[in-house]
Image (spheres, rainbow, N blue to C red):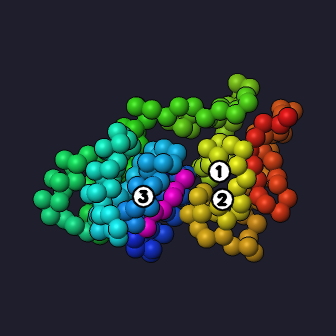
Amino acid sequence: MRVLVVEDERKVASFIRQGLAEEGHTVEVASDGAQAVDLLVAGPPYDLVVLDLMLPKHDGFDVLKTLRAHRIKTPVLILTARDSVTDKVTGLDLGADDYLTKPFSFEEFLARVRALLRRGTDQRLPLLQLDDLTVDPATRVVTRSGRRIDLTTREYALLEYFLRNVGRILTRPMIAEHVWGLDFDPESNIIDVYVGYLRRKIDDRGERRLLHTMRGAGYVMKASE
């Protein structure tokens, strides 16, 4: 699932991003309200927004108002240090789906994320498809030519990221950030190892190759010509 974390405190954002990435989600971070609005209104859809309230440029309430004004129904979990009943009521009345205050238990946070994502999958999530490869984001079932493919959590997150960016060259730093929630370490070959794992599962049975290496650039998923 694609999750947008809107948080201006870098350590908190990094902690949340890494934890969600370990659960198999593709995570992006916006550090201020204006950036969040741009990503939510103009970019590809997200499955969940984790939203702080005390943000530079536009506060979280303004971001939420803009989101709902554009009829974007993406579930929103407010995660903030503001714990007054007034703030909670305001956030929920503006269209937030849940409200969690800091400091928080990460286990509880993940449980709330899972609940909101389950609720969201009842409303949308079209299949991701390329050639004869199909992924159902709601169930995480992956098939190729009708054959089910079993993936680990990390392999699935990697595949979903590729399928949401078909035809686009993804660099190793991009993959590290979005799939692992980490800064890219040029000394590590972990991305190449996992791309190899994924390629063996989806491309090594005689089907047309879908996952391509772009030497010196990164990787791209596209149908072979």
| Vertical order, 219 against 148 (above or below) | below
Q: Which residue is mark 3?
A: 36
Classify residue 85 as left or right of residue 7: left
Mark 2 → mark 1, Cα distance in angstroms: 8 Å
| Residue 51 within the magenta-colored segment of the rendering | no
Mark 3 or mark 1, earlier in chain: 3
Pick the front one: 38 or 92: 38
The magenta segment: 26-31
Name the amino acid, label 3.
Ala
Q: Which residue is mark 1?
A: 158
Query: Residue 175: which numbered mark, if any?
Result: 2
Element type at mark 1: helix
How would you classify the magenta stretch by its main secondary structure? strand
What residue do we see at 73% from left, 30% from top?
A: 131
Which quadrant of the figure has residue 144? top right
| Foreground label between 2 and 1 | 2
Name the amino acid, label 1.
Leu
